[in-house]
Amino acid sequence: MSIHRVVLSACAGLAALAAATTMSTAALAAKYQLNINTALTTDDPIYKGLERLRDRMKERSNGEFEIRIFSGSQLGKDEDVLEQARAGANVAVVVDGGRLAVFVPEFGVLGGPFLASGYDGVRKVVTSPLFDTWAQKLRKASGHEVLSFNWWQGERHLLTNKPVSKPEDLAGVRMRTPGAPVWMETIRAMGATPTPMGWAEVYPALQQQAIDAVEAQTPAAYGSRLYEVTKYLTKTGHINLITGLVTSASWFDSLPPEMQTALKEEALAAGDFASRATEAAIATYEKDMADKGMTIAEIDVTPFREATAEVYGKLGYAELKKTIDEMLK
């Protein structure tokens, strides 16, 4: 063997030893570990809330509980991480109700058009006894545990390259939206052609004109610099995006009772922290996008509200919507 190969082999061995030592040290430092996946960027208020959760759990457990956060979907698509959780992995994901509706249909109503107003409105729904019954159904149906579902990302608006004020203006417009049925039907009812694709694909798809528009909440649109590839943000607020932190039920059950309680309490508190930070940041994001040349348009949303009213009945949510309306009175 040449001296060169000996040196390379020695270096590789030392690198592997260093990595193993680092992993062993991390394992010794914490008894419990949770890896959280999110599609959002590190400057998003939701990410800041996850950091708060990480820090509070470390403090509350005296260093025994470690949370690692993976932005930009580093652990995979939301659906992939949900499958990892079903298999018992120590992972969690920030996910919307539409992706959970494949297991428990009731979750899909959370993505329904004009369901509730702002964070305070939708928070009433996701902290209610009614929601608790959905969470229990989810645990039995898919093996997932909801840690909290009060991670509000903002109301979703239209980002286009032409002015929009009524459904007719969206005729023939290919608009990116998540692939869940409630989202697809909402965008179709609003007049556009729903085009599902991953969030990371949106910017290049707009740039290459593979799609014409996107609907999204302001923090995500700002974080992904969509003001560079669209001209108008029309404030429809058609979907009030509330998301949850969902993990493996079997992994959760393996934790000591006091750790389970702490994790749920801190997840709820961190969700409130992140959601209030989102509320506070939206005006700043809008001003910055306007300064960069984007038109921020306030419109009468009545035509869109009327056009999407049929979505609940079409998807079998008519009675559930009535129950929620009563709750919000």
Image: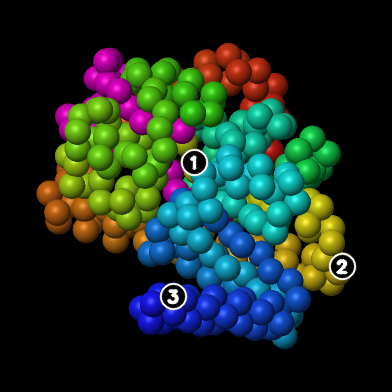
> Which label lies toward us, 1 or 3?
3
Helix, strand or loop at label 3? It is loop
137 lies left or right of 303: right
Q: Position of residue 233 (x, y in %)?
A: 26, 40
| Residue at the disc numbered 2 | 257
**Which residue position holds label 1?**
240
Residue 325 visible? The answer is no
Q: Is 60 situated above or below 213?
A: below
Q: Residues within 10 Å of mark 1 (few under 14, many from 20)?
A: many
Q: Position of residue 156 (x, y in %)?
A: 40, 40
Q: Is residue 148 above or below residue 196?
A: below
Amino acid beneath label 3: Met
Residue under the image location 46 percent in, 59 percent down: 71
Q: Which residues are magenta?
A: 151-178
Q: So how many labels did they put on this image? A: 3
Q: Is 161 part of what is drawn in magenta?
A: yes
Which secondary structure lies at badge 2?
A: helix
Q: CA distance from mark 2 to mark 1?
A: 33 Å
| Front one among 190 and 263 | 263
Which quadrant: the C terminus? top right
- Number of other residues with Cα within 10 Å of mark 2, as a class: few under 14, some 14 to 19, many 20 or more: few
Q: Disc 1 and disc 3: Cα gap in Å?
A: 65 Å
Residue 213 in picture, x, y percent from top left: 27, 31
- Upstream in the sequence, badge 2 or badge 3? 3
In front: 109, or 97?
97
- Left or right, 64 with respect to 230, comes to right
Q: Which residue is mark 3?
A: 1
**Mark toward the start of the polypeptide (2 vs 1):** 1
- The residue that appears at 42% across and 18% down in the rendered structure is 189
Q: Are marks 2 and 3 in contact (CB under 8 Å)?
A: no
Taking the spot 84% from the left edge, 58% from the top edge, the residue there is 253
